[in-house]
Image (tube, helix red, strand yellow):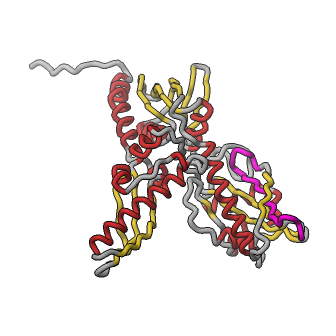
């Protein structure tokens, strides 16, 4: 009886063949992954309070939902469009906004015969919003930063105060509300763990070990040490000076000093709250300006992605598709330990590389061309050391 014959393959061929079929499939899966959590959250607007009255509850509900669409759209535009360009966004009614909304949820709904109250959550359609703004020539940013920890230090009579009470500067930051930008801000509570992690003097000196300790505990990617000093008594106009050193960000912890005029009729607490609000908004605007998407220019590169297995490739491809300035990714070839890709991107090469770093990817030139690798979690710039914010 004849023995069944078996086809013979060269060593390694099955793995290569499998990779050639699996990698494009995995790339498609990663590209179709519903905008990863960090990106999807950019287009998520929570806690939209609506309250409307009309001749009946049904009409009141219609009015409230229309108002909610308008409020949510306005908040989204303020989040992703620079303040200098918000005026270029056309005014839309709820019917025009609806196609930009992927879904919305209603919570805490209350009705009477003539009144409707609720809190709404809107998930805007990422692609639809991008097309809408791009078609109208409005520049915008959708890259969300890692959380930034703010350490508000008050300088009085030559003494630095951080956890001491009273510290109206730290209390002003703790009282901030309505901050809904691309840079999530964390304000320490001032508990015993905070006191153990870092002192006011260590914060002002930029002690990398102590800054790293408190940043790690709060899960922050950078730490902004903000030293506020009341202007000279009797100065005209009265002002508060703020020196900000952001550790773990692009400025490498170099202090930036700004002077903010305040209302002399306001209380000390009110003056500090006003300045804290302005500083926070400036941080958001600076981040947006440095992360704008430029659809009118771009480029492409071919890069090799070293991979140890399918899991690593999936992680790289998801992070790549999750980078807002990535326009298109195609697989050119694959082997057991590397994937060759062609990537088209928006903007310039330096901006694209910076955007990749924020998604834990490193693009660098090797002897044979560009190499794209993952940056292990916990590696890269740390608070207290110079480098790019992740």
Q: Left or right: 176 with respect to 47?
A: right
Magenta-drawn segment: 233-253
- The residue drawn where x is 58% and y is 48% is 82
Q: Is residue 237 magenta?
A: yes
Q: Is residue 195 visible?
A: no
In front: 62, or 208? 62
**Image position, residue 198 (x, y; %):** 75, 65
**Image position, residue 149 (x, y; %):** 66, 60
- The residue drawn where x is 46% and y is 25% is 342
Q: Quarter of the image containing the N terminus?
A: top left
Question: In the rendered image of this protein, does residue 381 appear above or below residue 70?
Answer: above
Question: In the rendered image of this protein, does residue 222 appear above or below residue 187?
Answer: above
Q: Residue furthest front?
A: 55
Q: Left or right: 258 with respect to 6?
A: right
**Image position, residue 4 (x, y; %):** 16, 21
| Rendering quarter of residue 127 | top left
């Amino acid at each position: 009886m004849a023995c069944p014959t078996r086809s013979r393959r060269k060593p390694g061929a099955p793995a290569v063949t499998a990779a050639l079929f699996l990698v494009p499939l995995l790339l498609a899966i990663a590209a179709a992954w519903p905008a990863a959590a960090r990106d999807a959250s950019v287009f998520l607007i929570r806690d939209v309070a609506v309250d409307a009255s009309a001749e009946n509850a049904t009409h009141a509900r219609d009015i409230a939902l229309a108002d909610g669409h308008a409020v949510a759209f306005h908040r989204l535009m303020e989040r992703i469009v620079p303040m200098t360009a918000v005026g270029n966004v056309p005014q839309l009614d709820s019917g025009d906004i609806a196609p930009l909304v992927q879904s919305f949820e209603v919570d805490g709904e209350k009705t009477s015969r003539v009144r409707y109250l609720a809190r709404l959550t809107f998930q805007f359609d990422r692609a639809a919003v991008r097309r809408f703004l791009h078609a109208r020539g409005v520049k915008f940013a959708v890259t969300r930063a890692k959380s930034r920890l703010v350490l508000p230090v008050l300088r009085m009579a030559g003494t630095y105060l951080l956890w001491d009470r009273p510290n109206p500067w730290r209390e002003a930051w703790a009282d901030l509300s309505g901050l809904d930008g691309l840079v999530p801000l964390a304000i320490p509570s001032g508990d015993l763990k905070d006191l153990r992690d870092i002192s006011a003097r260590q914060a002002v000196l930029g002690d990398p070990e102590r800054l790293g300790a408190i940043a790690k505990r709060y899960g922050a990617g950078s730490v902004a040490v903000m030293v506020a000093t009341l202007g000279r008594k009797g100065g005209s106009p009265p002002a508060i000076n703020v020196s900000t050193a952001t550790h773990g960000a692009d400025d490498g912890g170099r202090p930036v000093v700004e002077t903010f005029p305040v209302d002399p009729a306001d209380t000390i607490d009110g003056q500090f709250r006003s300045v804290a609000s302005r500083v926070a908004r400036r941080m958001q605007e600076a981040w947006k300006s440095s992360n704008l998407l430029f659809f009118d220019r771009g480029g492409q590169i071919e890069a090799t992605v070293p991979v140890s297995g399918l899991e690593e490739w999936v992680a790289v491809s998801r992070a790549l598709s999750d980078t807002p300035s990535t326009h298109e990714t195609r697989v050119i070839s694959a082997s057991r330990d590397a994937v060759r890709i062609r990537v088209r991107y928006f903007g310039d090469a330096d901006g694209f590389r910076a955007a990749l770093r924020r998604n834990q990817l490193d693009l660098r030139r090797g002897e044979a061309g560009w190499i794209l690798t993952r940056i292990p979690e916990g590696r890269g710039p740390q608070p207290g050391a110079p480098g790019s914010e992740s």
